[in-house]
Image: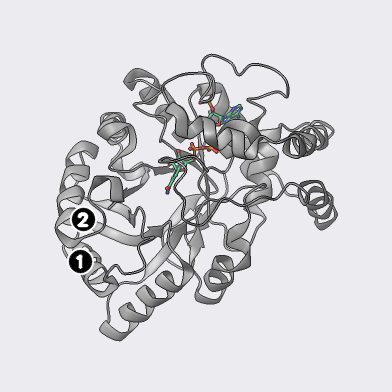
Amino acid sequence: MPKRTLGQSGLEVSAVGLGTDAFGISVDGPTVKKIISAAIDHGITLIDTAYMYGGGKSEEYIGNSIQGRRDDFVIATKGGHPMDGGPARSNLIKELEVSLKRLKTDYIDLYQVHVLHDSRFPLEEMMQTLNDMVRSGKVRYLGLSNMYSWQLCRCNDLAEIHGWDKIISVQPHYHMFEREVESDLSQYCQWAGVGMLPYFPLAGGLLAGRYTRGEEPASDSRAGSDAWGAGMRRYFDHYGTEATYDAIEALAEFARARDHTLAQLAIAWLLHRPMLSSVIAGVSKLSQLADNATAGQWELSQDEMNEINSIIHAPRRPLPTSWDWTRKPL
Ligand SMILES: NC(=O)c1ccc[n+]([C@@H]2O[C@H](COP(=O)([O-])OP(=O)(O)OC[C@H]3O[C@@H](n4cnc5c(N)ncnc54)[C@H](OP(=O)(O)O)[C@@H]3O)[C@@H](O)[C@H]2O)c1
């Protein structure tokens, strides 16, 4: 598994990481143990979780699974989601302490603010709080997720002015059919050396061949089970258009012709985009983990990238930046 640095920081992460928002929803504790043990065998060291995933079970199951081998992993978690109280100082401090307990560790490698989309939020207070976390030794590096690029820029300017730790990475919604980040955020990231960890890299499974046009979703998939709720179904309705399926079928054929899978292609394509540090693909099965892990070695030529881009160009259809699909219909 190739390793990359997270942006221009000294933090090394595996090119393919492990997303864990299914842990505690559709993946139980014993399966998490098996997935994490297999992850390290595949060279996957970066695990991305959050205070809110699975109502806390994601962090708890990961904590149980990494005991005795904590230093083998790079643990990224998040706090400050508006559904849990937002990134106010008191809330971030409280959530970090809970995350440390659940993860059974005394440090977090990468602490990310989960959602910052409130333009009025006092960034100076937040950055000072994050800086204090680093000074205390409980956090090693800082990241943001779901923010406007001006907020990221302002946070790093504040850090420079005050001599605080900077934001080294961002976690935006980014996959073959969701490329809004390329118009603005990725420009800043390239200029400032901030790494990207795209979320929903496989469009929740659409880009992994989990769904077939005209067929009912499998009962153990996100779209087919009740565990994920209406928000996830709206997500698939939004991206699973006829044009998307046309492209998916062509992409699957492109991958098959090269002895690869669609999921591997979706991951490898992202790894060839600027400032991409690691693809934190989520999995619910060991077979998916093994499939995704090998994508880290797939080198795509410029001609191949051009061919892929010509296939995926048409269905691009970004979600509104307000990112509110979990709450109300689009
Ligand atoms: N910052 C944020 O706001 C935010 C938001 C969402 C996610 N995230 C992070 O990003 C990570 C990735 O996103 P995600 O897990 O939601 O979505 P994803 O990576 O786009 O899709 C994961 C799903 O795709 C299917 N899958 C994965 N590999 C497969 C393979 N090789 N073959 C067939 N199907 C495969 C599985 O679906 P089934 O389970 O149906 O089998 C899996 O649960 C999360 O786990 C989380 O850590 C962050």
Q: Amino acid at mark 1?
A: Thr
- Residue 166 location, x and y as percent? 35, 72
- Residue 207 location, x and y as percent? 65, 36
* Secondary structure beneath label 1: helix
Residue 129: mark? 1
Report the label total.
Answer: 2
* Secondary structure beneath label 2: helix
Q: Does mark 1's beta carbon lie closer than 8 Å to ligand 1? A: no
On the question of residue 67 being in view, the answer is no
Q: Is residue 30 above or below residue 319?
A: above
Residue 92: mark? 2
Residue at 81% over, 57% down: 302
Q: Is residue 305 left or right of residue 95?
A: right
On the question of residue 308 being in view, the answer is yes
Residue at 74% over, 46% down: 315
Q: Contact (CB < 8 A) between labels 1 and 2? A: yes
Q: Amino acid at mark 2?
A: Leu
- Of the pair 258 and 315, the residue shown nearer to us: 315
Residue 210 occupies quadrant: top right
Q: Is residue 87 left or right of residue 317?
A: left
Residue 293 occupies quadrant: top right
Quarter of the image that includes the N terminus: top right
- Of the pair 68 and 311, the residue shown nearer to us: 311
Quote the CA–CA distance across marks 1 and 2. 8 Å
Q: Is residue 42 above or below residue 215?
A: below
Query: Mark 2, residues whose alpha carbon is within 10 Å: few (<14), some, or many (≥20)?
Result: many
Q: Is residue 150 above or below residue 138?
A: below
Residue at 17% over, 43% down: 98
- Residue 174 location, x and y as percent? 57, 51
Residue at 82% over, 55% down: 306
